[in-house]
Image: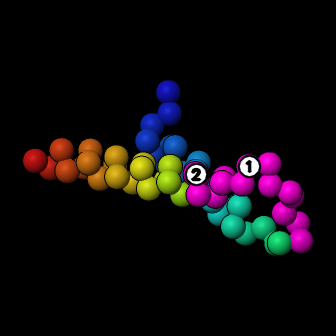
Amino acid sequence: MKTTVNRMAFYTEKLVQYTAMQPSKIRPRSSRYRFSRLMEYKSALVRQIEAERNQQTC
């Protein structure tokens, strides 16, 4: 099972790859909202990590 940190690293890498593409090399989007979904997933993971960190410190 993947840890939260592994998931965060995977999706962060995907975001970097997606944003680093030159516009001429981007394939037609099969999913119109892919970038926003990745960003939302990343922020959800950050919130989850912060919540776990806060629980550990309390």
- Tell me the quarter of the picture where residue 56 sits: top left
- Left-right relation of 4 to 17: left
- Label 2 close to label 1 by CB (< 8 Å): yes
- Residue 28 position, x and y percent, is 86, 57
Q: Nearer the viewer, residue 9 or 19?
A: 19
Q: Nearer the viewer, residue 51 or 23?
A: 23
- Left-right relation of 10 to 43: right
Residue 37 marker = 2
- Residue 54 position, x and y percent, is 20, 50
Residue at 58% x, 51% y: name it.
37
Residue at 42% x, 50% y: name it.
44
Three-letter amino acid code at the position of disc 2: Arg
26 is higher (above) or lower (below) than 46: below
> Pointer 1: what residue?
31
- Tell me the quarter of the picture where residue 55 sits: top left
33 is higher (above) or lower (below) than 6: below
Marks 2 and 1 sit apart, C-alpha to C-alpha, by 10 Å
25 is higher (above) or lower (below) than 31: below
Mark positioned earlier in the residue sequence (2 or 1):
1
Q: Nearer the viewer, residue 30 or 38?
A: 30
Question: How many numbered discs sit on the rendered protein?
Answer: 2
Q: Residue furthest top?
A: 1
Three-letter amino acid code at the position of disc 1: Ser
Q: Which residues are magenta?
A: 24-38
- Residue 38 position, x and y percent, is 58, 53
- Tell me the quarter of the picture where residue 43 sits: bottom left
